[in-house]
Amino acid sequence: MHMNTPAPSSALPIPGWIAFMPPAFVLLWSTGFIGSKFGLPYAEPFTFLSLRFAIAATALTLLSLYARAPWPNTFVQIRDAVIVGVLMHVTYLGGVFLGISLGTGAGISAVITGLQPILITALAIPFLAERVSKLQAFGLIVGFLGMVLVVWTGQGAGPWAGMVACISALFGITLGTLYQKRVTSARDLRTTSAVQQVAAFVCMFPIALVFETRDVIWSGEFIFALTWLALPMSVGTFSLLQIMIRYGAVAKVTSLFYLVPPVVVIESWFLFGETLDLQQGAGMILATLGVALVIARKKS
């Protein structure tokens, strides 16, 4: 069955099964932070991601060939897939993996990247000439203050280089989501995702060659983490995200990201013993409140 859609995304009828996707997405997306924490002790971040992209690209290519899915066949289609691949995989995942490898906690990295709805609204003001309500403006301020409390010399924050890496990941996933929504119509999801993964590997592997030793400890934990992140995450969860972007407004889709940090905090506490201090706990609450205020207006 082909997953390409002939109509513009704004005109697509919404299938009933879409309603079951958001909770599955939140749970699966949260495990990306956990999986990276599991695997990074055994491989450097860009080496880890190069392996992940190679496996995901191979799996998606074989799936597309088996299904005889239509491939992007124009310069514009290939260019768009490459841009989304660089933003959503190289920049976003590269920032998260680098941040965690430098000592930033999985929960804190999730809080930072979970501010995506706030950044989307902030970028819409100068670039899209959108007006924001007073409630949204208040939400922007509250969310920013929350992030400051979370990252400012708090427990498990790690060095500032890790914070900067996670913030760059925030910009990557935000711009990638906006661009994906703009170009998502009439493209087959399987082949487009395959091109994205190939582009991500082509960008990431040279970085690993230049800056890393590329040594890997092939432990059971690493193999499990790599397999989980390359297949259920890169193939499955990113496909869920793109399907939801295709069928729904960007604001509704990105609102799911503010549910991810609390889930990651609970998972990382249970698995790794990570905790937030009082300051960071207050910051996470403020960040979540800020995102909720920003998306409340958009939903209405």
Image (tube, rainbow, N blue to C red):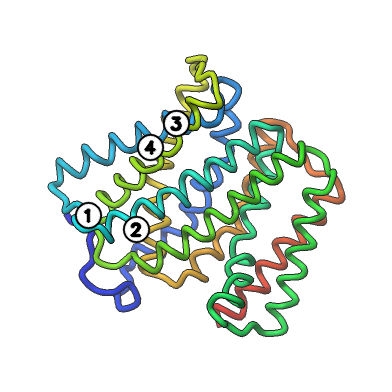
Q: Tag 2 or tag 4, which sits nearer the N-term?
A: 2
Residue 16 placement, left or right of 88: left
Residue 260 placement, left or right of 108: left
Looking at numbered disc 3 in the image, what kind of residue is underneath it? Pro
Q: What element carries label 3?
A: helix
Residue for badge 3: 206
Q: Do the residues labelled 3 and 2 touch (CB within 8 Å)?
A: no
* Mark 1 or mark 4, whichever is nearer to me: 4
Q: Is mark 4 on a helix, strand or loop?
A: helix
Q: Distance between the residues labelled 4 and 3?
A: 7 Å
Looking at numbered disc 1 in the image, what kind of residue is underneath it? Pro
Residue 72, label in figure: 1
Looking at numbered disc 4 in the image, what kind of residue is underneath it? Val
Q: Is residue 270 above or below residue 133?
A: above
Measured as percent of width and height from the top left, residue 226 is found at 45, 29
Measured as percent of width and height from the top left, residue 159 is found at 77, 37
Measured as percent of width and height from the top left, residue 59 is found at 28, 36
Residue 6, label in figure: none
Q: Do the residues labelled 4 and 2 touch (CB within 8 Å)?
A: no
Q: Is residue 263 above or below residue 9?
A: above
In which image quadrant can residue 300 be found? bottom right
Q: What element carries label 2?
A: helix
Q: Nearer the viewer, residue 83 or 15?
A: 83
Q: Tag 1 or tag 2, which sits nearer the N-term?
A: 1
Q: Residues within 10 Å of mark 2 (few under 14, many from 20)?
A: many
